[in-house]
Amino acid sequence: MTHTIYQQAPLPFMGQKRKFVKAFRQILRGYPDDVTIVDLFGGSGLLSHVAKREKPNATVVYNDFDNYQWRIATIPRTNALLARIREVTDSLPRGKVIRHPHRDRILEIIAEEEQCGFVDYITLSPSLLFSMKYANNMDELVKQTFYNTVRRNDYCADGYLDGLTIVHKDYKALFAEYRDKPNVLFLVDPPYLSTEVGTYTMSWRLADYLDVLTVLQGHDYVYFTSNKSQIIELCEWIGRSRINRNPFECAHRVEVNTTMNYNSNYTDIMLYRKNENDEQILQPAG
């Protein structure tokens, strides 16, 4: 049976790894046919799809934490919705701003569809919003300027997830299931640090990114990051400095909230600690 081989995810997804497909295939060829491949942060499923096509006899576990499977299942509804929007925009110039009353009519159509069921706003976004802008719901969509970039053809994902073992789990729980098994390759593609993660269904702090690194210890992995995250530089520094304890341990913490304007604020933090073996206490001048 012939399977379609996708070179990119069939539906829009921020951070899909389509530019790495060729190099990823080359890595997979160094593994036995019966390898187990665990995609801890499955995202669009593109890495899992490529892995299963390259290694048909492998067990490929796709952790669909962002429910991409459901978006694929609703493609017929999405195509029907886009067809209705196309009726409004076909007479308008491509790539230009959609103004009233056409914009109002599009919002009415989307609202009608939402009353009947699920609207895939992420898939809808590239057809209505400026490049690389996404909306997750109607509240976010109505705040955006609309452009006539409506997709001309229907979406299709036939066979995209065929053969995959699909789970919906916290990556730590999934890793625990496979960490002690032999012949396992972990795919580790967390949301990038210092990068927009607005379309993901998880909220991450620095500690969360660092926790992911524990997966890499003593296991085969393919790990993705970017130069914005500076994770690699941080790990290289830790290796050089050989710090074996938290330098802020037992330090006191003082926080001051600062407001820049009506929608921007941040917290300044001061940490202080006096080592017990200090011989001198500094007094303020006076």
Image: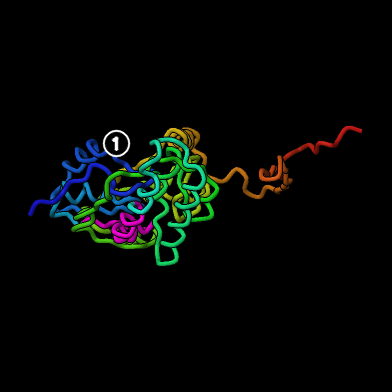
Residue identified by numbered label 1: 19
Is 126 in front, or is 132?
A: 126
Examine the image and state in which quarter residue 74 appears. Answer: bottom left
**Residue 188: horizontal and vertical position, in percent?**
34, 47
User: What colour-coding does the image apply?
Assistant: rainbow
Is 97 in front, or is 40?
A: 97
Badge 1: residue crowd in 10 Å (few <14, some 14–19, many ≥20): few
Question: Is residue 13 at all visible to an observer of this figure?
Answer: yes
Residue in view at x 30 percent, y 46 percent:
221
- Residue 171 on the magenta segment: no
**Residue 122: horizontal and vertical position, in percent?**
41, 51
User: Which segment did they paint magenta?
Assistant: 60-82
- Residue 62 on the magenta segment: yes
Is 137 in front, or is 100?
A: 100
Above or below 150: residue 70: below
Side (left or right) of 93 relative to 75: right
| Image quadrant containing the N terminus | bottom left
Residue in view at x 30 percent, y 44 percent:
152
